[in-house]
Amino acid sequence: MPKQYPIQSLHIGQPKTLEYKGKEVTTSIFKKKVAGPVHFFETGVEGDKQADLVNHGGLDKAVCVYPFDHYPFWKKYLGKEIGEAAFGENVTVVGLIESEVRIGDIFQVGEAVVQVSQPRHPCYKLNLKHKETIMPLLVKETGRSGYYLRVLRPGDVSAEDIFMLLERKEKNPTVQEVHAMRFGKNVSQQVMKKMSETQELANGWKEWFSQILEKQ
């Protein structure tokens, strides 16, 4: 029987402008829970508008996912409730953690078919969300990054739906491994080469690994 992972909740949001360190910042990290159904398009989620189209959205980053399994850790670490969509994710999923899922894995969720494309790159807006100062660093150090999906077949998705594994890329690195290779130290050229040649990895990440290789 295919592996199945339930959705904890679905979220969408609109750009919001706030003050951060004396400057105005526009962000869509503050998302609200919806029951659905919402449509997963090839470039994003229905009702969810990205404020930063350079770092969010598009074919390789259509849907942001974060494992609910990490919520207790962050609640304890930060010493406070972290709320829903704590990492600005569209989907909070149960059980599908970074060490479990591989780049290129394909899942059916509701009517949509999706594929894991890259880890989520933590940015300073997590500080804004949690009123902290080093959230991106903490995410990098812990590897609790979440990840992005590309949408191979658009369709409606509801909070009651599950992620059902259709195809596993056994030879590809896990999301956790890719994250560790990007933010770790003393990474070998061989490993960098493997990352840059992982076909299903998002283009931006492959290019980054290739550029590092060229400089070595």
Image (tube, rainbow, N blue to C red):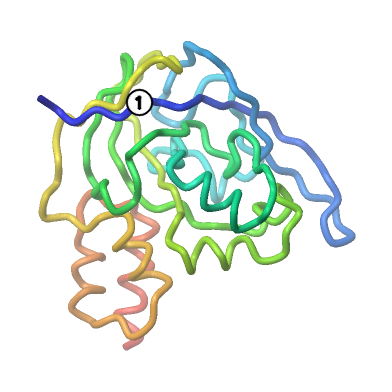
Q: Is residue 178 above or below residue 41?
A: below
Q: Provide the secondary structure element on which disc 1 rests.
A: strand
Q: Is residue 55 left or right of residue 39?
A: right
Measuring 32% from the left and 62% from the top, which residue is drawn there?
A: 178
Measuring 61% from the left and 36% from the top, which residue is drawn there?
A: 50
- Which quadrant, please, contains the N terminus? top left
- Tag 1 residue: 6
Looking at this view, is 76 or 158 the one in front?
76
What x and y, as percent, mark residue 78?
65, 56
Measuring 36% from the left and 17% from the top, which residue is drawn there?
A: 161
What x and y, as percent, mark residue 61?
43, 42
What x and y, as percent, mark residue 204?
39, 57
Q: Is residue 33 left or right of residue 8?
A: right
Mark 1: amino acid? Pro
- Which quadrant, please, contains the C terminus? bottom left
Measuring 89% from the left and 60% from the top, which residue is drawn there?
A: 22
Looking at this view, is 73 or 204 the one in front?
73
